[in-house]
Amino acid sequence: MPSPDKTIAVINASGRQAASLIRVATAVGYHVRAQLRNLEGVVANEVAMNPHVTILRGELYTKERPAEKTTVDVTKNGPISGIGVNRALINELFRGAQLAFINTTFYGDELKIGEAIADAAKKAGIQHFVYSSMPDHRAYNKDWPSLPLWASKHQVEEYIKKIELPATFVYTGIYNNNFTSLPYPLFCTDLQSDGSWIWQAPFHPDAKLPWLDAEHDVGPAILQIFKDGVKKWGGGKRIALAYEMLTPKEACVLFARGVGRPVRYIRGPIEIKVKIPEGYRCQLEALEELYDLKNNDPAKQPPYFGNQELEDSCPRVAMELWEGPRGLEEYAREVFPVEEQANGLTWMLEEDNGGGGVAHGNGHGNGVYHHHYHLHHNGGALSPPRENPDSDGEDDDDGLVMKGRKRDEEEWLA
């Protein structure tokens, strides 16, 4: 079979979504033009060493402020709104490309960057533009709050429709990969002295949520969207990428089965035990408002994707695209211990299941963390973003970063 004579433009190529696509697409002969912020981390190095990938290294934003006066607002379009757009890099990204998979993040003004990317794609004649979007819940119900780090994606989506790009919008469920024993807000599996875990979050324990293994299943699904083409998926269609609909209690049962340890869900406020960027704090506050702890009726929990029809399509539509997903139980059994060990934790090496050992820790089984910020979803799923504060420093990221034997300052951008 001849290799496909197609080039895919991708941004934030070390993120879970983009890296997943790059792996599967290049394996069957596609070429990729990939923007990377830097070459730090095992995923960035993996992408850079792929012979079918052309790397464009640099930020999508610039340090120069636009000519017009702009007010910085961390809750609007990104944690460093008001910074300029690197239009030269964006234009170069699409040179010779026919397809695009774009997952914008909160580095810079996400809306302005998203609009610039869409404009450049249209000018370059991109045949199929797949955008990883998320909902603005207030657009569906005025009584629901907007999640600020998702609302800008909704605005980018609306702009893509406005300029009539041949586009498909994918909405990713909660990543299986979100769970960690490190003390990150929202998806911390808090390791107890008896070796069990507690997951505390504001979601109703009996309301279904969409789940996805991002690094395993995004790539094959996006590749199939490209193969099917705009005739099937174009015209602004929205696709919910989620392969399991699980309540938090059901998720804990599967996770416990995978790791062979008890995992208990507690519905409660989001606990913040580490320094977090202000933009992410606003996201968490809005999340707690959206998933109101006073609501005792699971039927009244707002749909994760904002739209009930999109929610009801899970996992049927995703299974049309890719029939070999990795479920939460398989992830917990085969991947979670590896990722935890890579982050400096050693509970998986403890024979007595007690105490939750760590390579270097704080006495609570929380492992190694540094004052940078771990991100993976962002993007699409609820998870901590990294933040690059508006300053003149070149390496001024503030928050947490994953560090360990397998990961050396790896960034999961989305």
Image (spheres, grey):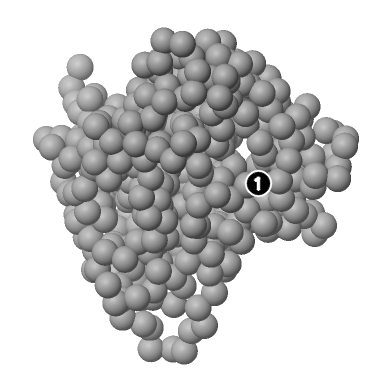
Can residue 315 be seen from the camera position used here?
Answer: no
> Label 1: which residue?
270
Q: Is residue 169 left or right of residue 374?
A: right
Q: Is residue 184 left or right of residue 8?
A: right
| Residue at (23% x, 60% y) in the render | 58
Q: Nearer the viewer, residue 16 or 41?
A: 41
Q: Position of residue 314 (x, y in %)?
A: 63, 27
| Residue at (49% x, 14% y) in the render | 353
Task: Say which quadrant the N terminus sits in.
Answer: top left
Can residue 299 be seen from the camera position used here?
Answer: yes
Q: Tell me which corner region of the image, top left, top right, bottom left or bottom right, holds residue 116.
A: bottom left
Q: Position of residue 49 (x, y in %)?
A: 13, 37
Disc count in the image? 1
Q: Position of residue 2 (x, y in %)?
A: 18, 22
Q: Nearer the viewer, residue 78 or 261?
A: 261
Q: Is residue 123 above or below residue 33?
A: below
Q: Tell me which corner region of the image, top left, top right, bottom left or bottom right, holds residue 324.
A: top left
Q: Is residue 272 left or right of residue 231?
A: right
Q: Within 10 Å of the Cα at label 1, are there few (<14), some (14-19), or many (20+) other Cα atoms?
A: some
Q: Is residue 108 left or right of residue 187?
A: left
Type of amino acid under label 1: Ile
Q: Position of residue 5 (x, y in %)?
A: 20, 34
Helix, strand or loop at label 1? It is loop
| Residue at (55% x, 14% y) in the render | 261
Q: Nearer the viewer, residue 230 or 22?
A: 22
| Residue at (67% x, 57% y) in the render | 285
Q: Tell me which corner region of the image, top left, top right, bottom left or bottom right, holds residue 196.
A: top right
Task: Say which quadrant the C terminus sits in.
Answer: top left
